[in-house]
Amino acid sequence: MYRFGGVFALPHFQLSSHLYSTAQGLLNRTIHETIQRQLDRVPYPVWNPWSSAAEGTPEGTIGANHCEFILFLQEAPIQFDAKRKHLLLTKQPSSDWLEHELRYPTGASLPLHSAMAMSMVGFSPDCGFVIESKGPPDYPPSEATHLLGSKTEEFNYQARHTILIFALTLSLQVYFMIKQAKEAATPSTLSRISFYTFAIMALGDGFWFLALLFMHLFIETSQLALYSLSFLSFFLVIVELRFLMDAWKVQVTEQNRQDRQEAANRAPTNPQPTPPPPPPPADQSEGLPLPVTAARAQPATPAIVTSDQDATNGGGGNATQGTTARVELSALYSRFCFLLMIICFVTLHFTTMRFTARAIYFNVLCFLYLSFWIPQIYRNIMRNCRKALRWDFVVGQSIVRLVPIAYFYMVEGNILFARIDLTSLAVLAGWVWIQIVVLFSQSILGPRFFIRDGWAPPAYDYHPILREDEEGGSMPIGSDMVSSPSSPTQPQAGESRSKGKRVYDCSICAQDIEVPVIPADGGGPDVQGLGGLTLQRRAYMITPCRHVFHTPCLEGWMRYRLQCPNCRETLPPL
């Protein structure tokens, strides 16, 4: 078998005599220049400059045999997709035309075809081994196929479509985020939202921003599109961080107020009385001043109470509170950036590990990222809040944030060449669906419908079930139901025509409210199941000051003020 000596074998790979002669002349000229350059150097090298051995390594100095490896690739004919055969009936495209259109697109409609297939034979004439690919026609496609892959032009074309889809998902995220920010624009609505839910979303978008900055290393022809997409992701992060800071200010102020109330409740209820000042000496004449050494009563120190508006705005005119708020905001930004950098560095480290460890890490990372509704569910339980977020925001954000992950888990030949894993994708999608179902159930059945009493701190229930035997304690103000044994069929003042219900007046909309009431004898409306009072009581709300309103009316009022519309008493947040 003829031994190919490095670069001397290159002209033999040409497909025509003209190309062979051109390559031979170029090779001879290159060899002559290389020899002359080596002769001019001092000292003269001892290795062969045109050998196939590594540069600077003389042949024979290494104990192991030096093996040349020659590779032959044969491209298989292009197989067009059967769904687009009607395009081939009018015009049979040639390979040259397809190559030119792929490299220099003019907008022509290209027929779909399968991935590029190549048969491969590699052998080493020195070491005497042969490697050959397996595939049709010797082996069925179900058993083995030759080398498969897509052309660079087609890969870039598919990558551009993927970038457009990803840009659409980011645009929808910005749209849903702006709508939610407009909805939660008051302290009452911001206090219902979980800070950590939006923090997880911001971390995920920040991770996408850093990943898109370096994605051009895999997709060289889409660098401008990737940079534009990273800017959109960065804009989304800025919007989320701004919303997080507004929510943080309101929630920290509310927490400080609660801490002050708890501290006041823990203070002794019966403090020791202050002893009165000693009486003046008996021998002192009336009207004469006391001596210098005599004890004098100290004036009372005035108490300065800040307004609620100053507390809500983070201190208002108080310079010390304002400085503290700015310092805490800077600390939040620093923690966010630091945590984001740690996640990125750890992710880069796991990309170079074995497939099993890499798959476990990315599955866990995606699972934690798609758990962004868990903090909101927890806050709904702790605050006894039924409705904190818009439903289009919940459903829309769940779908658009799951789309990029689904692309890498289910699309074969994606831009990062990740392996498909439909089982993990089904688990992640099911986990997101479970969170949405729990949020929806909390808005219908109550935030604490699936936990036992005592697991959460006590909170005021705006939808209590009324009983006649508790009129003095929990019945609303504004209805005087007088039972009349002589005319039981005629409803009295405040009584509805339906049995077991009372009529009240909503001062917000000036309309009547029918509130179900359980009679003292145990009859009346059924309270078991979803068909009874469990759902009927969601139509009305009763404040701690015993005023009753329609649920939409009072919820709309409490978006702006946490005060009773009738008596201006402070209301607990939803």
Image: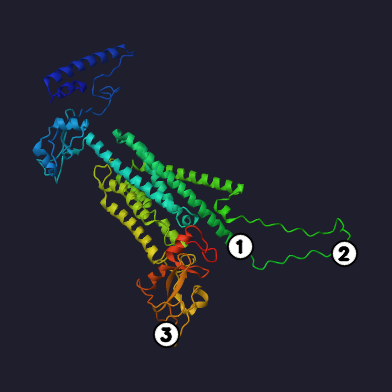
- What residue is disc 1 on? 264
Where residue 509 sits in the image (x, y, percent)? Answer: 45, 65
What's the CA distance linking mark 1 and mark 2? 40 Å
Q: In this orientation, does residue 210 appear?
A: no
Residue 324 is left or right of residue 430, and the answer is right
Q: Nearer the viewer, residue 295 or 391?
A: 391
Residue type pointed to by label 3: Pro
Residue at left offset 91%, top offset 65%:
283
Residue type pointed to by label 2: Pro
Q: Residues within 10 Å of mark 1 (few under 14, many from 20)?
A: few
Residue at left offset 18%, top offset 15%:
25
Q: Are marks 1 and 2 in contact (CB under 8 Å)?
A: no
Q: Nearer the viewer, residue 244 or 378?
A: 244
Q: Nearer the viewer, residue 474 or 133?
A: 474
Q: Is residue 445 above or below residue 242?
A: below
Q: Is residue 273 above or below residue 104?
A: below
- What residue is disc 2 on? 281
Q: Is residue 265 above or below residue 83?
A: below
